């Protein structure tokens, strides 16, 4: 199979090279047809420059630069739209996941359109764990579905999913992008499976967390989606 792998990165200059090296070591075990895309979301450190240096040395690496920060959802959207292979796999740029766990997603991919990870033991501070616990339950109450970890940054999709369900239907570009994507795909009949993956403490850079404005924007996007669904407003196509 052909595999497009990408990750969003915001000020991750110490993580970029090790993550790319891991991708080039691990992912060829699963495919002979690989592309790696780094989405630099308006970084102000050397993230973009390092990404360009890596791409200059390796033909399988591409870089997408956002001149201004678009947010996590905007970066993931860019990676999904840029993918050219039959399967799309993405993770976060903070190296809190092990790429070998792609084998867990692939093992569950037969007959599925998407396989999404959930962190079996999340390695984050208690405050983030509590917020995530509340957030996931709120999503289940408001939208239904058996979602265990809507924001887990370890996901695998068949690329043709986005021909059937265009990304224009997902309006958020912020922190609510991942939940809205899953909700939108599930409502369109996309077959999604959830698989446990490992999660590790961050070793480079401080956790970025979510500033109040990001949280407020996510709540706004969540409520807007719930209102559109209640009112039966059609998604954009």
Image: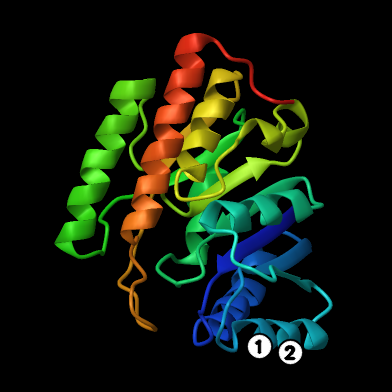
What x and y, as percent, mark residue 190? 60, 24
Please name the residue shown 60% across and 83% down the image: 47
Is there any visible trace of residue 197 in the rendered image?
no
Q: Give the quadrant of residue 135.
A: top left
Crowdedness near tag 1: few (<14), some (14–19) or many (≥20) residues, C-alpha within 10 Å: some
Crowdedness near tag 2: few (<14), some (14–19) or many (≥20) residues, C-alpha within 10 Å: few
Task: For marks 1 and 2, give the CA distance.
Answer: 5 Å
Please name the residue shown 72% across and 85% down the image: 54
**Quarter the C terminus occupies:** top right
Look at the numbered disc 1 and give the secondary structure of its residue.
helix
Location of residue 35 with respect to 14 vertically, above or below: above
What x and y, as percent, mark residue 139? 34, 31
Please name the residue shown 70% across and 35% down the image: 168
Q: Give the quadrant of residue 86.
A: top right
Location of residue 46 with respect to 189 vertically, above or below: below
Look at the numbered disc 2 and give the secondary structure of its residue.
helix
Please name the residue shown 56% across and 27% down the image: 184
Q: What is the number of the mark on residue 50?
A: 1
Q: Please state which of residues 161 and 137 is positioned toward the viewer in this rendering.
A: 137
What x and y, as percent, mark residue 159? 73, 41
Q: Please state which of residues 172 and 3 is positioned toward the viewer in this rendering.
A: 172
The residue beneath circle 2 is 53
Q: What is the number of the mark on residue 223?
A: none
Q: In the displayed structure, does residue 167 sit left or right of residue 137?
A: right
Is there any visible trace of residue 13 in the rendered image?
yes
Residues at discs 1 and 2 in contact (Cβ within 8 Å)? yes
What x and y, as percent, mark residue 137? 25, 33
């Amino acid at each position: 199979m052909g595999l497009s792998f990408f990750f969003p990165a915001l000020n991750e200059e110490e993580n970029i090279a090790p993550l790319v090296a891991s991708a080039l070591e691990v992912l060829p075990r699963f495919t002979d047809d690989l592309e790696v895309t780094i989405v630099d979301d308006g970084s102000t450190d050397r993230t973009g420059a390092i990404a360009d240096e890596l791409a200059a040395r390796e033909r399988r690496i591409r870089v997408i630069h956002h001149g201004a920060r678009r947010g996590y959802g905007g970066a993931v959207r860019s990676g999904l739209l840029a993918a050219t292979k039959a399967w799309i796999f993405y993770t976060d740029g903070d190296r809190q996941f092990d790429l070998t766990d792609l084998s867990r997603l692939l093992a569950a991919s037969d007959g599925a359109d998407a396989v999404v990870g959930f962190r079996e033991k999340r390695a984050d501070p208690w405050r983030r764990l509590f917020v995530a616990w509340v957030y996931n339950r709120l999503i289940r109450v408001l939208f239904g579905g058996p979602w265990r970890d809507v924001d887990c940054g370890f996901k695998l999709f068949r690329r043709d999913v986005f021909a059937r369900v265009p990304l224009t239907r997902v309006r958020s570009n912020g922190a609510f992008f991942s939940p809205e994507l899953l909700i939108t795909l599930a409502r369109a009949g996309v077959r999604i499976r959830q698989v446990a993956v490992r999660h590790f403490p961050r070793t480079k850079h401080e956790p970025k967390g979510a500033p109040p404005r990001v949280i407020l924007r996510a709540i706004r996007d969540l409520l807007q989606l719930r209102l559109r669904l209640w009112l039966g407003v059609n998604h954009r196509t």
